Image (cartoon, rainbow, N blue to C red):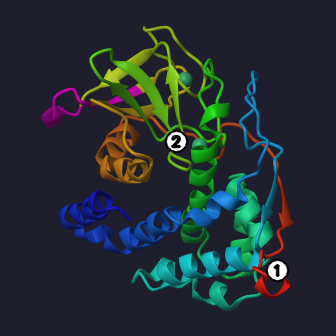
Amino acid sequence: MTASIDSSVQELGRQRPEWEPWLAVIEEVLSETADAKWDGFVPAGIEARENKIPLLAGATIALEANSLRRWTERLLRTASRSGTAKMATLKPAIQAALDVFALFKASLCQDGDRLNVIAAALSADPEAFQAVMALAPVPFLHACNRRWTHAIAPNWAEGYCPVCGAWPAFAEVRGIERSRYFRCGRCAGEWQLHCLICPYCGMTDHNELVTMVPEQDGTSRVIEACKRCLGYVKSFTTLQGSPAAKVMLDDLASVDLDVAALERGYKRPLGPGYTFDVTLVDKPVEKFSFWRA
Ligand SMILES: [Zn+2]
Ligand SMILES: [Zn+2]
């Protein structure tokens, strides 16, 4: 993890001491995300798509089962040790004979029903289990975003992420041109929007879109909400886009805006923006065979 990301996590911890347990989990995810081994699992040969289908939809992904198991166990262990009662219910899952492929697939596809079934079978708190498992595919998804930048259609105009199909975590209004980008909280992907639009229902009528400014902050952090579908997006004015590793932290650091939006009756939809399936297959571990050379 880079020093600047490290200090961002520490700064958040100072501002919100009650978040320390959750920040320990985030820190684990960010350090795993920096591991280049995930790049080796990204499906090759993905080409730009002109249609509305995210790049990950329908992909066949070859993963090393042991590698995935170690990561899943480490994530669950960090969460279960974090000190909250709900997170502690994840402890038995570490020793359970987990079907890591089924679990990873449900997390990757944001299949909340499937995750609830798995949580129930493990007697884990469903909310804690969902929250932690939502982070399990982040290292893989960041690797996809790194390797697939070339394949993102330049005219992508959907509200959901062109890489992984998730709804945006927030919008960035960048530079003096004030170009608008949505950012994905899972893969850190970005996509430019050419007008003010509700990502959830596609509304572009300015009379239906409202901007709410939290009082003490000026106008660099606002909530953009849609009166038709009652969805909202946080929007930050910034010189340039956040580095990939900082997107999750930006999302977390602005939770006051989420609270303000919820209090005014707006929400972010649950589940994926685009529902899709993937096929996971076991990738044999590559071994060096010096003795055969
Ligand atoms: Zn994404
Ligand atoms: Zn809307």
**Which residue is labeled 1 in the image?**
293
State yes or no: residue 221 in magenta.
yes
Which numbered mark, 2 or 1, is in the foreground of this view? 1
Label of residue 191 in the image? none
Q: Position of residue 215 (x, y in %)?
A: 16, 33
| Residue 168 visible somewhere in the drawing | yes
**Which residue is labeled 2 in the image?**
184
Labels 2 and 1 touching (C-beta < 8 A): no
Q: Nearer the viewer, residue 2 or 5?
A: 2
In this rendering, the answer to whether 137 lies above or below 258 is below
At mark 2, the secondary structure is loop
At mark 1, the secondary structure is loop
Calculate the distance from the C-alpha at mark 2 to the C-alpha at mark 1.
Answer: 45 Å
Residue located at (82% from left, 80% from top): 293
In this rendering, the answer to whether 286 lies above or below 147 is below
Q: Position of residue 60 (x, y in %)?
A: 84, 52
Badge 2 residue CB within 8 Å of ligand 1: yes
Q: Position of residue 15 (x, y in %)?
A: 19, 61
Q: Which residues are magenta?
A: 214-224
In this rendering, the answer to whether 33 lies above or below 142 is below
Q: Nearer the viewer, residue 122 or 227?
A: 122
* Three-letter code, disc 1: Ala
- Whichever of callouts 2 and 1 sits on the residue coming sooner in the sequence is 2
In terms of image quarters, where does ligand 2 lie?
Answer: top right
